[in-house]
Amino acid sequence: MGNILVCDDERSICELLDIALRRDGHKVETVTGGDAAKRKIDSALFDVIVTDIKMPNVDGVEVLRHAHQISPESAVILMTAVDDYEAAVEAVKAGGATDYIRKSPGLVDEVKLAIARSLTKVSLSRQNFALRRDAATRNSLDNIVGVSSAIDKLKQTIRTVATTSSTILVYGESGTGKELVARAVHTCSPRAGEAFVSVNCGAFPETLLESELFGYVKGAFTGANQNRRGLFEVADQGTIFLDEIGEMTMPMQVKLLRVLQERTVRPVGGTAEIPVDVRVIAATNRDLDRQVTEGTFREDLYYRLNVIPIRVPGLRERREDVPLLANHFLKKYAPATGKSIHSVEASSLENLTGYDWPGNVRQLENTIERAVALETSAELRVELPAERPKARAAAAGAESAATYTVGAGAVLPEGVNMENYVAQIERSLLQSALSQTHGVQVRAADVLGISYRSFRHLMKKYEL
């Protein structure tokens, strides 16, 4: 079903199409003039615009041009009388109009068929956009590499929950492959033929994330020169994956909660609610229970997301999968470098299996990729990472903090200021974390074990 705008200077035709299209389940708005149609196009997103050509003041061709400029994703159907038939044909040939219909006793049926054709094109366009945005959309259970009992249990869980439309919360440490799990759920579900759209909630400022998820209308903010559909609409009938959900700000959490409750989205600057049928899969490496207790994550949203929880095990919990993964990544990267490396050295495999892998599968992949790039023989020798990144950052932070540590029973210097003392420690820890993560603030917040929002607040506080 679609969101339809009907424009005709004959009120009776508007009323006739309004009744007929609503019976088919469409959401319909009608206007009786071209000016009114342009204003509607400016303020809301329509899947299909049906307009008469011959109207006083602003005609249908001008409505078509305006729609093509402001809302290029909308399909436009022109209704014509005999005397303006040639204008409609030219508009279609020029690529602006999607279809045209002659006004006749069978007008309602003709409009219904034209709308059905247009909605099919709109749906295909959205799917193509999602495929271009996520080239690796189609991942199955085979992409989750492993033979351990932990992975077997994970795959069985995916098979079971994929048949439902319930919201899923995937949680686990960073680098465990939470997006692979989300894609596998989608591929095994009845929605597999539709779009899978992935968005990292920690990668966008609040205002940009809202327009990314829900879309916007022309004039909503500086630079909004045309209407744009949000990712929830792009994922309609399919799946949207909200990664790093724990980084979402409280105002955005309220807006997401409303979408989950009402199953509608409102574009930024718009007034109309757009229904969406989307399966939501969220993921986090945060402890959302703790965030709820701390008041940084809404409890009602947590329960909305945590309908079906799926935990992805860390690599140290499935050490028997390490050799399999190492060879998998070897086969992936050796051909790309043009090297004939046939296997991983036995002693290297033993060392890899015994390592704890704080960065999980992602860290193992990076380690193998680096080893392949440096290898000059037919057998891959792998050197383990010297230190855990978090341990090194913690040590750096502890060293900085030690500068300001006062031992128990020590005599405090005269005029000591506790607020300044704590501020020096916090500032030093922030600087150490930023240095460790090469300035990547999201990762620095993760190193310190605080939310990105809290990290940004402290950065602003200390003018870093």
Image (cartoon, rainbow, N blue to C red):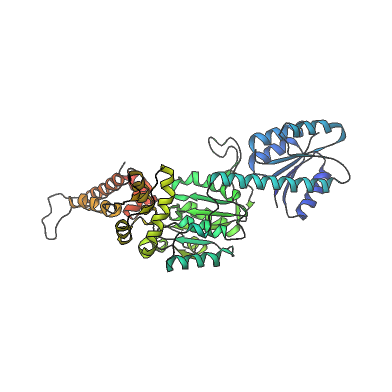
| Frontmost residue, 63 versus 174 | 174
On the rendered structure, is 407 left or right of 253? left
Res 244 seen here: yes
What residue appears at the point 66 percent right and 46 percent down from the top-left corner? Answer: 124
Q: Is residue 72 above or below residue 276?
A: above
Tell me residue 33's x, y (percent). 76, 37
What residue appears at the point 51 percent right and 57 percent down from the top-left corner? Answer: 182
On the rendered structure, is 376 left or right of 272? left
| Frontmost residue, 446 versus 16 | 446
* Tag count: 0
Quadrant where the image shows the C terminus: top left
Tell me residue 49's x, y (percent). 72, 42
What residue appears at the point 14 percent right and 58 percent down from the top-left corner? Answer: 407
Tell me residue 246's x, y (percent). 43, 56
On the rendered structure, is 260 left or right of 248? right
In this view, which residue lies farthest toward the right?
A: 105
On the rendered structure, is 12 left or right of 382? right
What residue appears at the point 82 percent right and 44 percent down from the top-left corner? Answer: 13
Tell me residue 210's x, y (percent). 52, 47
Q: Is residue 85 above or below residue 239?
A: above
| Frontmost residue, 17 versus 329 | 329
Q: Is residue 440 above or below residue 68?
A: below
